[in-house]
Structures are given as structure tokens and as C-alpha cells.
Image (cartoon, grey):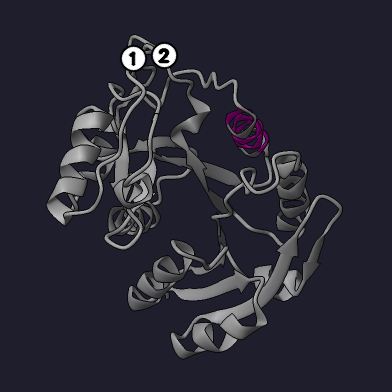
Amino acid sequence: MKNKISVIGCGWLGFPLAKNLVSKGYDVKGSTTSNDKLDLLKNHKIQGFLVSLDETQISGGYSKFLTESEIVIINIPPGLRRNPHKNHVTEISHLINVIEKHNVKFVLYVSSTSVFKDSPDFPEITCDAQPNASSNNGQQLIKIEQILRKNINFKTTILRFGGLYDNQKHPAKFLSGRTHIKNPNAPINLIHKEDCIQIITAILKNKLWGETFNAVYPYHPDKKTYYSNYCEQLNIPLPSYNMSEKSEGKIINSSKLVQLLNYTFKQTP
């Protein structure tokens, strides 16, 4: 019998992840903030629960959602673009408090490579590098990583994804036709949703707890070349760039993940 897993956040990534875990024989619970989504989860053999987080509390059926689950996957975007003044650290702290009370043994936290700042010399950054982001989003993620890593009630693995995409949701489509885009010479750091799902599944299978990983496809052409070529192939308007300022960026190194999981990326950007 495989572990019971609670997936917090069954959205764009979490829902297909939960479906994949069910197909691998896991007993999966999934949280959503939408009542309309409960039937969808049930139809895919995912036990659905309404759970909401805000700065004041965690609400909904979180106790039943966490009961008997040995593993919790936290997959909640900070949402700071929509609400830049939100304290996402406090939100996750409420969640951690209830996780502690439900005898969860392992937590997988989906973080971001935005914990590392961009630089004009495009440094290559391994997962062992010290996070140094100055942005609000990056600093809040750094704090959450620290809180989880120090928690003695469960073991946490931190998984930092680069720019997430699939064929429908691709950054080139978002940038198409836009002007004055910054950092045209900066390297891309992308990862397909399917690789995200397969990597998480492999971490669970191999029981790699207490680790920190970067996860980005090892292909880093500059943004201007890559996004212009992608838009050209789709025959959609090309973006234009601000070439007057020096570009800042980084190259994310995922070699530790590749080595420990013997992982081969499935989708090329």
C-alpha cells in the first residue's frame, strides 16, 4: 500500500499532478477553493476538500484533508502580482501549524528559482547557492523555505521550479506583440508542466526527503532569440525589446536533481 498524500492547491499544476499520483497507486486528497471543482476531483478518484488560506487563518475542511496523510505537497502560488501587499509567509505559517497537528511526516514545498536575484554577469546557480532575492516575492519564498527547513516535526524537500509552461500556457504567447521588454540578453530558465509532474513523482518514489532541488530544463538561449523564434514559428506578432539597458539574469543549474533521480527531461522548451 502506497502513502496517502494531500496535495494543497489542485490548480493548473496540482490537478494533473494529483491525477498522475492516483495513476501510480497513491491515495490522494486534493484541496480547492472552488466548490464547483469538487465533482471534477471526485471523477478522477481524488478526494476533494474545500480549504482556504489567508493572512488571518486557514479555513474549511483542512482537518479531514490532512488526517492520515503521511505526505503533504504544498503547491500554492504566492499571488503577489495580484496582491503585492499580502503576507504570504503568514498564510503558509497557518498551514504549517495545522500540518504539525496531524502527524504529517514529509512535506514537499513547490518553491521558485526567483529566490535567486538576477545579475548582469548571468551567474550559474546551483541548488546549494545562498538565496539572495531582493524582490518581495523572492524574499517571502526564502522565508517560507527557511521556516519549513527548520521545522523538526516533519522533513521537508524544497523544489524550486523555473518558468512553468505548457503548450497552452507559454510565456512567448504572453510576450507576443509586447514592446520594451526588459533583459533581452538574459538566459531563459523554463520547465514544462509534464516535467514538473514527473520530477515530483520521482522524488516521492525515491523518498528523497530533506533535500533542496532546482528544476529547470538545461537549455538557456537568450530571451530575445528564443521568444522571437517561438513567435515566428507560431506566426504570431513578435515582441520587441529594450536594448538600451544592460540585461540581468541567471542560469539555473539542475544537475543535482538529474544525478540523484537519474532524471531525463521529457519536454524541450
Give the magenta range: 138-147
**Please, which residue is most extreme toward the left here?**
233
Nearest to the observer: residue 98 or residue 68: 98
**Please, which residue is most extreme toward the right here?**
56
Residue 91 in the figure: left or right of residue 164: right
Relative to 159, does residue 56 appear above or below in the rendering?
below
Asked if the residues shown at circle 1 and circle 2 are in contact, with their CB atoms under 8 angstroms apart, the answer is yes
Q: Nearer the viewer, mark 1 or mark 2?
A: 2
Nearest to the observer: residue 203 or residue 42: 42
Occupied quadrant, residue 38: bottom right
Horizontal and vertical percent position of residue 16: 40, 69
Q: Residue at x 70, y 56 (%)?
A: 99
Q: Residue at x 48, y 38 (%)?
A: 112
**Amino acid marked by disc 2:** Ser
- The answer to whether any part of residue 48 appears in the image is yes
On the image, numbered disc 1 is attached to which residue?
A: 123
- Dot 2 falls on a residue whose secondary structure is loop
Occupied quadrant, residue 188: top left
On the image, numbered disc 2 is attached to which residue?
A: 119
